[in-house]
Image: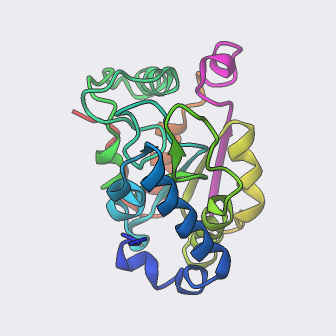
């Protein structure tokens, strides 16, 4: 399977891309896409890395699985394509953004403008079979994306990691907290948000304050 991964990532991940588990993963993914409807479309599997180069990473937002309904997933965690109805978690992200920074709820749920500014929107699993949540878990993707987090932690400094929910918080052990920033909160899903674990975390304004402290450009969180 063609690995459409930006060159800036291929160098630090060179050893990982050659490992037997990753080659087996690519064989599995190729077969799945040939025999089933899978998301995101094949050309978008590595979208998160192609819109946020290794050198540009300033913020990492960790998700779990791509959306598994038709037309939703575009290769960026929590993001959907322009004309797609915004899923509940994304709606709550935008509600917190409005509370935190006064940014009006955008019409599009496409988070590409964030990625283009250095926000790595990383799902732990990069593919999924249509209408079957978690169907590509434990096939090798998690090992690969854990290595990405460790590589960022090892080779960069002053990156802001946003860990939303229990799954993402488990990734904290991969991050050197002596040279990076870690912000934690509940997940933006209604189940967590409605119980008071999401709203009011102010992660968007806090991220920009931290970036300013280390002399980095802040993220323009507006999408329109």
Task: Return the residue nearer the eye: 189 or 24.
Answer: 24
Question: Residue 28 appears in which quarter of the rendering?
Answer: bottom right
Residue at x 32%, y 58% (from the top left corner): 43
Residue at x 64%, y 31% (from the top left corner): 187
Residue 172, magenta (yes or no): no
Q: Quarter of the image containing the C terminus? A: top left
Residue 187, magenta (yes or no): yes
Residue 91 position (above or below residue 176): above
Q: How is the image coloured?
A: rainbow
- Residues in magenta? 180-198
Residue 202 shown left or right of residue 98 in the figure: right
Question: Residue 102 appears in which quarter of the rendering?
Answer: top left
Counting from the top left corner in percent of width and height, residue 208 is at 45, 47
Residue at x 53%, y 31% (from the top left corner): 131
* Number of numbered markers: 0
Task: Return the residue nearer the eye: 112 or 132.
Answer: 132
Residue 165 position (above or below residue 17): above
Counting from the top left corner in percent of width and height, residue 216 is at 40, 62
Residue 22 position (above or below residue 84): below
């Amino acid at each position: 399977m063609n690995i459409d991964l930006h060159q800036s990532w291929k160098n630090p991940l060179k050893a990982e891309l050659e490992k037997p588990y990753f080659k087996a993963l690519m064989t599995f993914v190729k077969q799945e896409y040939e025999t089933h409807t899978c998301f995101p479309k094949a050309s978008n599997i590595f979208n998160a890395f192609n819109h946020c180069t290794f050198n540009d990473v300033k913020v990492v937002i960790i998700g779990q699985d791509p959306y598994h309904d038709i037309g939703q997933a575009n290769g960026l965690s929590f993001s959907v394509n322009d004309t797609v109805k915004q899923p509940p978690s994304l709606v709550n992200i935008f509600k917190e953004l409005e509370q935190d920074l006064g940014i009006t709820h955008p019409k599009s749920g496409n988070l590409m403008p964030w990625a283009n500014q250095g926000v790595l929107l990383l799902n732990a699993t990069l593919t999924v079979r249509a209408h079957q949540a978690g169907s590509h878990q434990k096939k090798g993707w998690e090992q690969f994306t854990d290595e990405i987090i460790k590589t960022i932690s090892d080779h960069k400094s002053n990156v802001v990691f946003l860990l939303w929910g229990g799954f993402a918080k488990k990734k904290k052990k991969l991050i050197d907290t002596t040279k990076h920033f870690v912000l934690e909160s509940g997940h933006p899903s209604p189940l967590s948000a409605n119980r008071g674990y999401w709203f009011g975390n102010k992660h968007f304004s806090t991220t920009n304050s931290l970036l300013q402290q280390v002399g980095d450009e802040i993220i323009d969180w507006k999408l329109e």
